[in-house]
Image (cartoon, rainbow, N blue to C red):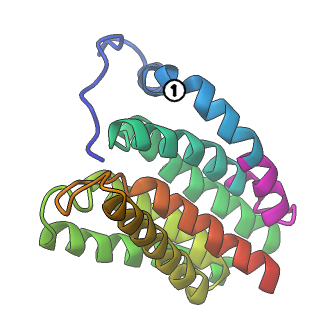
Amino acid sequence: MVSPTEPAATSPAQPFVVRQYLRARAEVAPHARAIGFLAVPAAIWAVWASGPGWLTPAYLVLAVTGAALGVIDLHTQRLPNALVFPLTWATAALLVLAAFGTSAWTTLGRAALGGLAFFAVYQVLYWLTPRGGIGYGDVKLTLSLGAVLTWHSWTTLLVGVFAAHVLAGVVAIVLLIGRRAGWKTGIAFGPYMLLGTVVGLTWARLTG
């Protein structure tokens, strides 16, 4: 959820891109095998769900980075800035590219509004819920997820958000019944946000 401090391997004297790469590598390295195992089917899904077409690059970046974020969050309950921030900027740039290729500038505007609306809702939830609920990494992740979902429609955004909360709720109930968690046990919510996005985008592909 909350990002770690900057890895010691980086130095202020290094170029920003190099420092960003080293931070991301430090986050991914301990979980590289699991991330690689998940990233392959995620990339295949991304190509299918996006058409393929002008949206494919954005979907691929979201799928592969999302695989890394999901694994890291499950193991550490963190969504590191070293991955979330590049995902946000890459998603924005690639959606602009998609709008340029398809002349879908109105769609791009809706995507931007969707990302901001999703962010605003989770920012409020972050302020209102006790610590251990929504982490600020979850809040930051909404910008990219919300933009991609709302590119298709506001309904797609609602489907993705609803699916995320249903999946998280079901897992929480199973853990409680199995006595693997208590009422105050925190769970990593990032993976469910990512899975909800997969559900929403798959729904858009099948109904579009």
The residue where tag 1 is placed is 31
Q: Decide: is 131 above or below 206.
A: above
Q: Is residue 53 magenta?
A: yes
Residue 139 located left or right of residue 100: left
Residue 176 located left or right of residue 207: left
Quadrant hosting residue 7: top left
**Which stretch did the figure color magenta?**
42-58
* Residue at 24% across, 28% down: 5
Q: Decide: is 3 above or below 170.
A: above
Please say whether residue 108 is visible from this viewpoint.
no
Q: Locate residue 55, reporting x and y percent.
A: 75, 62
Residue at the farthest bottom position: 155
* Residue at 29% across, 39% down: 3
Which is nearer the eye, 194 or 61? 194
* Residue at 42% across, 43% down: 74
- Which amino acid, mark 1? His
Residue 54 located left or right of residue 141: right
Quadrant hosting residue 169: bottom left
Which is nearer the eye, 18 or 45? 45
Q: Locate residue 157, reporting x and y percent.
A: 54, 80
Please say whether residue 155 is visible from this viewpoint.
yes
**Neighbours of disc 1 within 10 Å: few (<14), some (14-19), many (20+):** some
Q: Decide: is 105 above or below 172.
A: below
Q: Locate residue 151, reporting x and y percent.
A: 63, 76
* Residue at 41% across, 24% down: 23
Q: Is residue 143 magenta?
A: no
